[in-house]
Image: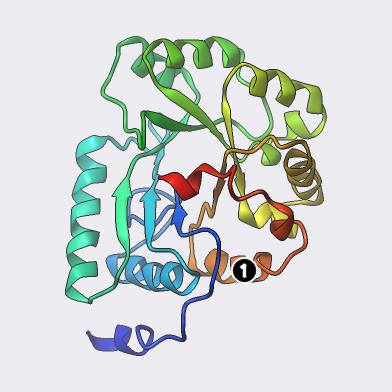
């Protein structure tokens, strides 16, 4: 096991109501998350330490920047799962994707491409942090016509929502599910993201909680989130992670 052995003798896992994660970048070498198989194994150890037993890896698919597809993602998933078994790490890992809502994704939807989904045809999507796509509502409509259930990743991080909460209510009422990043509750991204995350929780506008973990630093910081007042105010019966 080499240098990894000392990390796998970690302390007891933290108790958390979240046993399953549905947004992470643990697959190695295909986006801005883990850069190597060894690092993915270290992330797996951190997930276990944080009380997780099952995660869904969601690497970015973003035009020419992260041109991932089912074949690339499933190959990395297979490599990671073999290594987890070899090192006797009790973490169940599956894979979907985090699709960037651009013209490339619009074409995938309209051509009825075999998209990567999880649990009852849920599909995770994101947008630019600064600007709402011009075809935002239309694309959500077209996703649903394919029988897919869209989840908007980390809505609290989008500047265009931070400046206009009413737009979120419109999207929620249209049937789009919301996934809040745990680190947003700590103010890790920005005060605006934390404020909006708190508002979403107060309004009950959340369906999933995700780590969006790109690194061990993210997973270590989440341990502090577990202790926060806002985290402990969440109605975990409402959180769909618990039913994946």
Q: Of 200 and 6, which appears nearest the observer?
A: 200
Residue at 42% across, 53% down = 25
Q: Local crowd at mark 1 within 10 Å, few (<14), some, or many (≥20)?
A: some
Residue at 62% across, 68% down = 221
| Residue 187, percent from left and from top | 75, 57
Colouring scheme, one of rainbow, by chain, secondary structure, one colour: rainbow
Q: Quadrant of the N terminus?
A: bottom left
Q: Is residue 209 left or right of residue 34?
A: right
| Residue 53 visible in this rendered orientation of the protein | yes
How many numbered marks appear?
A: 1
Residue 62 against residue 43 in the figure, above or below: above
Single out the residue that lies furthest toward the front.
Answer: 237
Residue at 30% across, 87% down = 5
Query: Is label 1 in a helix, a strand or a loop?
Result: helix
Question: For residue 238, what is the image quadrant?
Answer: top right
Q: Quadrant of the C terminus?
A: top left
Q: Is residue 185 left or right of residue 240?
A: right
| Residue 72, percent from left and from top | 23, 42
Residue at image mark 1: 221
| Residue 172, percent from left and from top | 65, 24
Q: Is residue 202 left or right of residue 35?
A: right
| Residue 23 visible in this rendered orientation of the protein | no
Question: For residue 38, what is the image quadrant?
Answer: bottom left
Q: Is residue 85 left or right of residue 105?
A: left
| Residue 126, percent from left and from top | 54, 33
Residue 119 against residue 232 in the figure, above or below: above
């Amino acid at each position: 096991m080499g240098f990894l052995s000392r990390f796998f003798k970690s302390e007891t896992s933290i108790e958390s109501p979240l046993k399953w994660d549905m947004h992470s970048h643990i697959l190695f070498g295909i986006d801005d998350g883990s850069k190597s198989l060894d690092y993915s194994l270290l992330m797996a150890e951190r997930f276990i330490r944080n009380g997780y037993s099952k995660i869904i890896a969601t690497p970015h698919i973003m035009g020419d920047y992260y041109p991932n597809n089912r074949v690339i993602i499933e190959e990395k998933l297979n490599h990671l799962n073999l290594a987890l078994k070899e090192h006797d790490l009790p973490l169940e890992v599956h894979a979907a994707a985090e699709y960037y809502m651009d013209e490339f994704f619009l074409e995938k939807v309209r051509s009825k491409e075999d998209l990567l989904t999880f649990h009852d045809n849920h599909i995770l999507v994101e947008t630019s942090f600064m600007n709402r796509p011009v075809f935002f509502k239309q694309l959500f409509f077209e996703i649903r016509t394919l029988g897919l259930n869209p989840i908007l990743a980390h809505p609290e991080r989008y500047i265009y929502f931070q400046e206009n909460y009413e737009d979120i209510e419109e999207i929620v009422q249209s049937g789009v599910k919301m996934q809040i990043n745990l680190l947003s509750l700590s103010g890790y991204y920005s005060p605006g993201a934390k404020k909006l995350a708190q508002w979403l929780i107060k309004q009950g506008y959340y369906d999933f909680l995700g780590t969006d973990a790109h690194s061990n630093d993210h997973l270590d910081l989440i341990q502090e989130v577990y202790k926060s007042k806002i985290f402990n105010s969440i109605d975990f019966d409402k959180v769909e992670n618990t039913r994946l």
